[in-house]
Structure formats: structure tokens, C-alpha cells
Amino acid sequence: MGQFIKINSADNVAVALSNVAAGEECRVGDVMITTREDIPAGHKMALCDLSEGEDVVKYGFPIGHLLKAVAKGGLIDHNILKTNLSGILDYKYEPSLVSLAESSAKAYFKGYRRKDGQVGIRNELWIIPTVGCVNGVVQNICKAFEAELANWPSISKVVAFPHNYGCSQLGDDHENTRKILADMVHHPNAAGVLVVALGCENNQLDAFRKLVGDVDEDRVKFMECQKIADDEVAYGLGLLREIASAAASDVREDTPVSELRVGLKCGGSDGFSGITANPLLGRFSDWIVSQGGTTVLTEVPEMFGAETILMSRCQDITTFDKTVRLINDFKEYFMKNNQPVYENPSPGNKAGGISTLEEKSLGCTQKSGKSIVRDVLKYGDRLSTKGLNLLSAPGNDLVASTALAAAGCQIVLFTTGRGTPFGTFVPTAKISTNSRLASLKPLWIDFNAGQIVDGRPSGEVDDDFIDFVIRVASGEMVNNEKSHYSEIAIFKSGVTL
């Protein structure tokens, strides 16, 4: 592959695949262009003379307008490119649906079949506090059980999930906390769950149990610390032993890929995100859907500017209306807090070559492939429809990844051009957009999509990626698990008492 790539035939810019010095003569398609200045890897070069105010086109769509003229071969970055986006918009349902053929060759992974019919890809014990006041208690219970984990070979690990909420919250914030924690109780990656309450918090245990609903009582236990005489850590340890006993005979079994629910996320994006890793996830998403499985796209603010593409893929007018509300509700959230709707991309994105939110969104939404949008979920909702779903959550990496897992995704696939080590409460696999990052951070990156711009055929990379995900679903650990990075972050928008 050459020094530049022109992504769409309608584009008036090309993306540098490596650092290109000023004065170099480069071929872009059938045209030779001399660079007028240094073009860093991932950044854009003008393919023709462009005037002040003229739209820059990438991915076949405008990504903003120029604040000053740029000559052919010049650098275009965030300093001279401004978004075209503004405010609340009206939308019209103009469907353009592509029906993917159902795959005749069914794929399988090794999963844990749960009593409620769900399938987990891990067999862990989770300790969930209803309120931040008992964070220390759940962490001590976790440490105590870790010391005897070898006695329970069916259990891969025990994890406590401290957080800051559960009290002094009002309205939506309080309900968001309750919903996310309740979702976790039902997650199939947990062989069992111990819920630990204090007793005087807003998130009262009796009301929380009603929200949780029916559970396997052998595998889900509740305790309220203020009602326990003496040592609550010893009491909790006893409950964990009971749960572990109930899970002692758990084994993996062959499970069709149709049972997989995969979260699609990106963070620390760069100019290669929309060329390598995000399109790779899009093709993978289409493959999962063709197998009868489920994928979920979130990060609503990073749909702004590309939302009409998703709307055109909604299966019907009802799903379209839900998508419009998804978009406009998030815009109103920004406006209600007197914040600019389009305060994006981040400094890291800009350094990597992303100049406007349209550019970021057009790359971000490629993770959803070409599948029909089957449903739209509110924050804290759990999945009920197979196929491609949209989920309401912000772009924040930890909050969005937590929301994907809470919706029922057994794994989150996370593309990145800058790198990040974190993981949410399910395996959070990092897919690098470039080979430099994969080489620099092998303890963070699980799969290198940069192979594509290095010249490896995308079909080969796709096949390797499918094999990788199936291995992870069957038990192979990803880097965040190996490093014991596992946490939750809950969306907050209101006051704290």
C-alpha cells in the first residue's frame, strides 16, 4: 500500500499511512501530488486546491468546512477545519436496508448455559455493593475468598465492584445506579453474585431486590451489613462458599454463536480508526448477525453527524422514531447543561488526525457494519432483540463500556489508536488501529487491525479476528483480565445530596 489512502472516490482528501515529509512526491490513485508540508501519519492531505469555507469530504461525506484556503498537497487538521453541525434537527425516515444472508456454516464457542437460558463466557463470582459505603467490606470479602479460590476449580475468579453511588442521589441518577447494578446481578458471565448492602442507604435492599426480580437463589445471595452481628466479612465469606458450592459442577459446552452478544466501542481514536479497526468490527458485526447473534453500538455523541446513516438502516418507522429520540435526547442533555453539543473530538483524537465530530462519527459508526438496526435501548435496558441494537450512553469509555456489559453483552470489543489499559466487568478486548501501537503496548492490545494498512488482505485479518473472538468467548483471557483491570462506571447527570 502507498503512502496515502483515498477512502471514497468522492473524497477531496487522502490520509497519510505514515509520516510524510514536505516536498515528497506521492501517488494517490493515478495522481502524483507533492506535499507542501509535513503530513503526520493518520492526518489528511488536500487532493486539490480548496477554498475558504469549502467542505472537506472524507468517507464520501462532508466532515466540516475550511477556515482558510488550502492548496493541493497541504495539511488539513483541526486548526483549520470547523464542524458543520448545530443543534436539534428534524429527520425523515428514508430507509435503505441491506438484508444480510443467514450464514449456512454455523459457528460455535464453549460457553456456560445458565438456568435462565442465558449463556456466559466466564464463570466468575461477583460481589456487588448497593452503596459506596460498603466498598471496603466487599473488597475484604473478595480478598478472603481469593485465599481459598483453589478449592473451587469451577470458579475462574472472584471480583468486587466498588463504586461511589447508591445514596445521596435523586431522580434519574438514583434509578441509573439501581438499574446498572440489577443488570449485573442477571449477567450470565457470573456463576453467582453476592449483593452487599449497608442498610440506611437510598438504594434500600428490599426495594432493590424487587427491582432485580426472580433469580436463582442458590447463586444470588443478599446481605445487609447493619443487620449482621459482629463480623460482616466472615458472614459474606460464608455466603460466597454457598454460591461456589452451587456452581461447583459448571462446565463449558458447545454453544452456537447466535448466543453471543457483543458490545462495540472505540476510544482514543486516530486517523486509522475508520480505515482499519472500526471497519473490521463492522464486518465482524455483520458476521455475528448473519449467525443469528447480537451486537450493540453505543456512544451517542459520536453518532452526531453520521446519525442519518443509522436512521436509514432502521427496520421500521418505530425503530426510526426511537433512534431520533436517542440522538435528540442526548443533544438536549448537552444543551440543558449549557455545554456545546459538538465539543469533540478530544485532544488525543486531534493528535491522531481526527479534526471534527463528523469525521469521528463517520469512523465510529463503521463498527456497526451494514446490518439493519433492530432495536434501540435506553440507558440501563437489557437486550431483548437479536441483531444490531443501538444503546443510549455517552462516549466516556468506562461509562459506555459498563452500559454495554449491563445490557447483557458478554464481551466488549474496543478499538483504539492511542491505547488504553482499562476493562469493564466483562472481557474488554483492545483492537489497535495501527501496528506501531500494537508493538508499543503488547500488554494492552489484544488484536492488531493495523495489519490491514501494512498490506495483509482484509479477508485474512477478518478470519483471524473471528477465530480470536471465539477463543475469547471459549475462555482465552484478554489483557485487561490478565492485568486484573475490571471496574464499573455509572452515568451521573444530576445533583448529589
Image (cartoon, grey):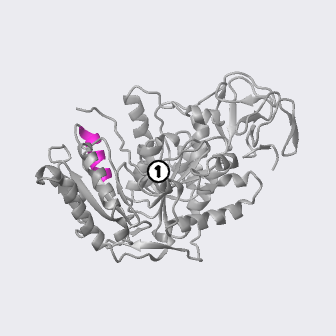
Q: Residues within 10 Å of mark 1 (few under 14, many from 20)?
A: many
Query: From where the camera sits, is residue 219 visible?
Result: no
| Residue at the disc numbered 1 | 423
Main SS of the magenta part reads helix
Give the x, y percent position of residue 287: 58, 65
Q: Is residue 381 magenta?
A: no
Along the viewing direction, whichever of 482 and 357 lies nearer the viewer:
482
Give the x, y percent position of residue 141: 28, 55
Q: Residue at x 28, y 73 (%)?
A: 246
Q: Secondary structure at mark 1?
A: loop
- Callout 1, which amino acid? Gly
475 left or right of 105 in image:
left
| Placement of 490 over or under 357, stated as above or below | below
| Placement of 420 over or under 224, stated as above or below | above
Q: Residue at x 11, y 52 (%)?
A: 227
Along the viewing direction, whichever of 480 and 298 lies nearer the viewer:
480
Count of residue discs:
1
Give the x, y percent position of residue 59: 67, 44
Q: Is residue 180 magenta?
A: yes
Query: From where the camera sits, is residue 439 visible?
Result: yes
Q: Residue furthest front?
A: 147
Which segment did they paint magenta? 169-183
Give the x, y percent position of residue 473: 50, 66
Along the viewing direction, whichever of 212 and 98 lies nearer the viewer:
212
The quarter of the image holding the C terminus is: top left
